[in-house]
Amino acid sequence: MSTLALTLVLVAALCHAVWNLAAKRVTVGGFAFVWCYDVGSVVLWAPLALVTLARADVGFSPAVVLAPLVSGLIHVAYQLTLQTGYARADLGVVYPVARGVGPVLSMAIAILVLDERPGWVAAVGALVVIGGIVVVATGRSVAGRHGIRAGVVWGTATGIAIAAYTLWDSYSVTTLGLPPVGYFVTTCLWQVLLMTPTLLRRHREDVVPVVRSHGREVLLVAALSPLAYVLVLEAMRTAPVSLVAPVRESSIVVGSLLAWWLFMEPDPLRRMLGAAIVLAGIVLIAV
C-alpha cells in the first residue's frame, strides 16, 4: 500500500471515530437522526459532487443511477442497525465488533471472489489488526453481560453490512469508474429518498426534537461520515480492498479510547493494549 493511500485511510479512520462518537450521543429518535444527517450530507456535499461529476465526464448510463441505489439500500441497513446498536449497548462493544467483522468478511471475499493477492506480510498485518480489535471488544460492559451480548449481536449485523457496502462500493469506483464524491452523494440522496416514506408515516414527529437537541451531532455526522468514506474510496482506487478494509479499522483505537474518556466505559488498559496491537498490524500492512 502506498504512503498516500495509507494516509487517506488513516485520516478517514479518525473522521469515522469522531462521527461515531457523535452518533452514540443520540439515544432516541434514531430513524429521524439518520434521515437528518443523510439530508445534511446531500446539502453539504452536493456542490463538490456536481463539480467532480462534471470533470469526470462519466456521461449518463444505468450504472450512474443503479450503482448508488444498491449502495443506498445497503447503507440504510447499515446506518439503522448501527444506530440501534448504539441505543442498546456500549459503543466500546458495538464499534469494535462491527469494525472487526467487516474487514474479516471483506478480505475473505476479496481474496476468494475478486482474486486479490496481498503479500504474506500484509496478510499477517491484517490478522494482527483483527486480533487487536478482538482484544478491545472482549472486555467488560457498562450494561453487564446483557450489554455485551447485545453489542456483539448488533455489531455483527452492522459488520455484515459494512462488508457488503465495502465490496460493492469498491466495485463501483474501480470497475465502473464512478467518481467517489459524486457516487457517495448520489448514494446519500438515494438513502434520503428510500427513508422518507417511512419517516413521514412513523417518525415525522421526531425530526424537530432531534434537530433541536442534537443539531451539532447531525452536522458532525453529515460532514465527517461522507469525508471518511470518500477518502476510503479514493484509497481503493490505488490499493487493494483487502488491505484498505483492515487499515480503516484503526478508527477502533480512537473510538474505543474516546468512548472510555467521554462515556466512562470500562477497561481502558485492555483497550490500550488492543490499540497497540492494531497499530502493529497497520505497520505490517504498510511495509
Image (tube, helix red, strand yellow):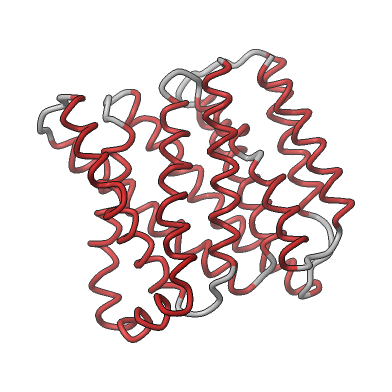
Quarter placement of the C terminus: top right
Please provide percent x and percent y for residue 89.
67, 70
Q: Residue at x 47, y 26 (%)?
A: 235
Does residue 284 appear left or right of residue 215 in this picture?
A: right
The residue at 55%/32% (across/down) is 9
Could you tell me residue 190's position as x and y percent? Answer: 25, 54
Please give left or right for residue 284 compared with residue 269 in the image.
left
The spot of residue 34 in percent (x, y) is 41, 66
Instruction: Name the residue at the left extreme.
Output: 60
Classify 69 as above or below 285: below
Front-most of residues 219 and 107: 219
Q: Is residue 147 left or right of residue 235?
A: right
The quadrant of the rendering that contains the N terminus is top right
In the picture as drawn, the residue positioned furthest to the bottom comes out as 205
Instruction: Note whether 98 is above or below 1 in the view shown.
Output: below
Q: Nearer the viewer, residue 102 or 207?
A: 207
Q: Residue 38 appears in which quarter of the rendering?
A: bottom left
- Please state the total of marks drawn on the protein image: 0
Above or below, comparing residue 11 to residue 225 in the picture: above
As displayed, is residue 81 above or below residue 121?
below
* Direction right: furthest residue: 269
- Residue 52, picture quadrant: top left
The residue depicted at 58 percent of the width and 70 percent of the height is 25
Q: Quadrant of residue 180?
A: top left
x and y percent of residue 73 in the render?
A: 33, 54
Q: Residue at x 12, y 33 (%)?
A: 61
